[in-house]
Image (tube, grey):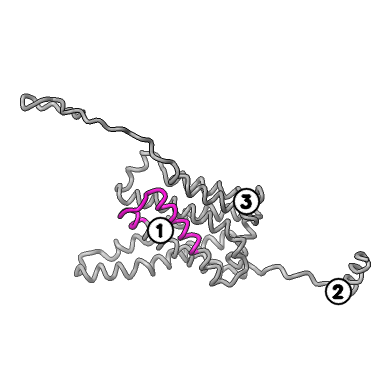
Amino acid sequence: MAYADLGGLGSKQGAPVTYDWVMPSLTPQVLPWLAILALLMLKPNRCATAWWILVPLACAAWASSPPESLRELLPASQLEIFLELIGALGFGLAAVWLLAGYLGWKHRMLAFLGILLALGGFGLLTCVARQGLGIETLQVGFVVTASALVISVALTLAGLMCRGRYGGLRLCVWLFAALVVVWLLVIGPFAVIAAISSGGNVPLGQFLGVVPMMAGLSFGIVLPFLVLAFANDFYRERLQGLLHLGAAAPPPIITSRMQAVLEAAGS
């Protein structure tokens, strides 16, 4: 029932309206978690160590739902896009880490395509599951797709630069530098076109100021998953294989004497 004190201009209460409230289904919200659970059931992930992926994933899920006091720092429209981006890329990176067992030590181009498809595919799945189909989903989906492309390229470039000397700090530095460069290449043309089309009314420096913000946001999303790989042997081997950080272990060399011993033991 609507209520408003109109003084002597009319009634304070409007006509009552009946509305039956039904609790929304939790299936769309749980769907990304079910997809990650399905990846954990894959044969290469059937070990207790693989479940540590839930730690950085939970960090991303928590960051995508901050308290109300932090929501006032940015305009509502921009904040919602950033929050959806964090959640979508968090699930996408978890999928990349869980599928890395199938991509390790493949050709760099195949590994890059695998990272892009897993990151972008699971990111878009998360967006659709959380928001449904609509104009806002298309906007967020565009940002998620662009971010997935940038992160995939940056990870590949960082692995290429660290192929000879692998270290956690070195990889993080090269990754952040690659994120800045790739985001500049993505946003730069749009900034130039906007400045030209508006006759110089759009400050180019202000437009390009989005580059460090997006690079920092992307790095902040990837960092918990890198920390997991640095601290966990299971995911460290997958990261090394995914980014070609070093060389794959060569097969053991069996000498003639060793072969004779093996044949004697077998007989």
Q: Give the camera-side residue of 133 and 159.
A: 133
Q: Position of residue 233 (x, y in %)?
A: 66, 55
Q: Give the camera-side residue of 73 and 238.
A: 238
| Tag 1 residue | 144
Residue 112: within the magenta?
A: no
Above or below, 90 against 174 in this view is above
Give the amino acid at mark 2.
Answer: Thr
Quarter the N terminus occupies: top left
Q: Quadrant of residue 215?
A: bottom left
Give the amino acid at mark 3.
Answer: Ala
Residue 50 marker: 3
| Tag 2 residue | 255
Give the amino acid at mark 1.
Answer: Val
Q: Main secondary structure of the magenta part?
A: helix
Q: Earlier in the sequence, mark 1 or mark 2?
A: 1
For residue 113, side relative to residue 197 (left or right) = right
